[in-house]
Amino acid sequence: MSDVSHWLTRAESLVARLEKLLPAEPVPVDWKAAIAFRWRKFNGRGTLQPVPQVHRIDIKALCGIDEQKSLVEQNTRQFVEGHPANNVLLTGARGTGKSSLVKALLNKYAPRGLRLIEVEKQDLIDLPDIVEMIYRRPERFVLYCDDLSFEADEPGYKALKVILDGSIAAASENCLIYATSNRRHLMPEFMNENLEYKHVGGEIHPGETSEEKVSLSERFGLWVSFYPFDQDEYLRIVGVWLDHFKAGGVRSDEVKHAALQWSLQRGSRSGRVAWQFARDWAGRKRLSATRRK
């Protein structure tokens, strides 16, 4: 009996060790837990995690990008109401409101069934699995890829191309891809690629390398470009955020000078820089007022 007990103990130990190596059973997604989810992988198995504290942004607070807001909101409204809509690529200068616009649209249209799933670049190879999980759901999903760019031969590049426009399976009607990037063609461009261009009948034709890079961004039906702000627009946005933080002296010369110095130190006049200055200014003023009491 002692031998049997010994072997049973060893067998139980072996089974316990094997269970640690095997992927766990997927946990059912609680679709009512949040309006935004993240795709995460544990032990080789992907799952959707609810985001309990979603960054709530009021679309009215986004200034200086009225044309971009109009384009992306129109597309999002079509999608939410069940009409044809396009995948969206938002490109341009950093800090100009690309990701904030996506978050603001989620905040506005979540009561009408819009949901967001954030997918990191390294997990884009799992896009077919994500689509399979959601295609029967009644909600409308934006698969969101922030700050997207690729180097040559990255696996996510091919996976994204396939899910956008190249799979034998039909695209799911209840999901779109919204991506933000500082690169319009999502991949680095090199000087030696210019040598591949050919002159044919007086026309310039790009080489295969350039065509391959352009082919991914062309699969997005809607391109929206964001640009740095001029000085007047930057100061206007500073004023909006100072009003938001209930800071005094919004349009004083002191505030304007400080805001311009702040932007010079960062080498950028963007909505993000304006927001950061307003937070700093409002915080310092409140702290100073507290100390005087």
Image (tube, rainbow, N blue to C red):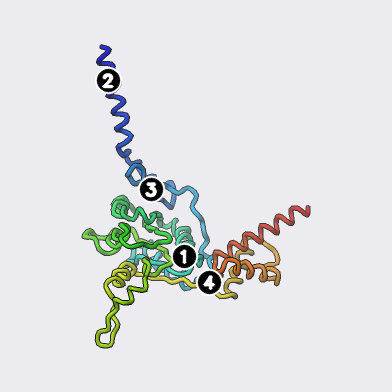
Give the spatial CA distance, label 4 vs label 3: 34 Å
Q: Which of pointers 4 and 3 lies earlier in the amino acid sequence?
A: 3
Rendering coords of residue 262 (x, y %) = 62, 66
Pointer 2 with pointer 4, Cβ within 8 A: no
Location of mark 2 (residue): 8
Rendering coords of residue 276 (x, y %) = 59, 61
Location of mark 4 (residue): 64
Q: Which of pointers 2 and 1 lies earlier in the amino acid sequence?
A: 2
SS at mark 1 in the image: helix
Q: Which of pointers 1 and 3 lies earlier in the amino acid sequence?
A: 3
Where residue 40 is drawn, which disc sits there?
3
Residue at x 48% of width, y 69% of height: 93
Residue at the extreme top = 1
The type of residue carrying mark 2 is Leu
Give the spatial CA distance, label 2 vs label 4: 71 Å
The type of residue carrying mark 3 is Arg
Pointer 2 with pointer 3, Cβ within 8 A: no
Give the spatial CA distance, label 2 vs label 1: 60 Å
Residue at x 30% of width, y 57% of height: 155
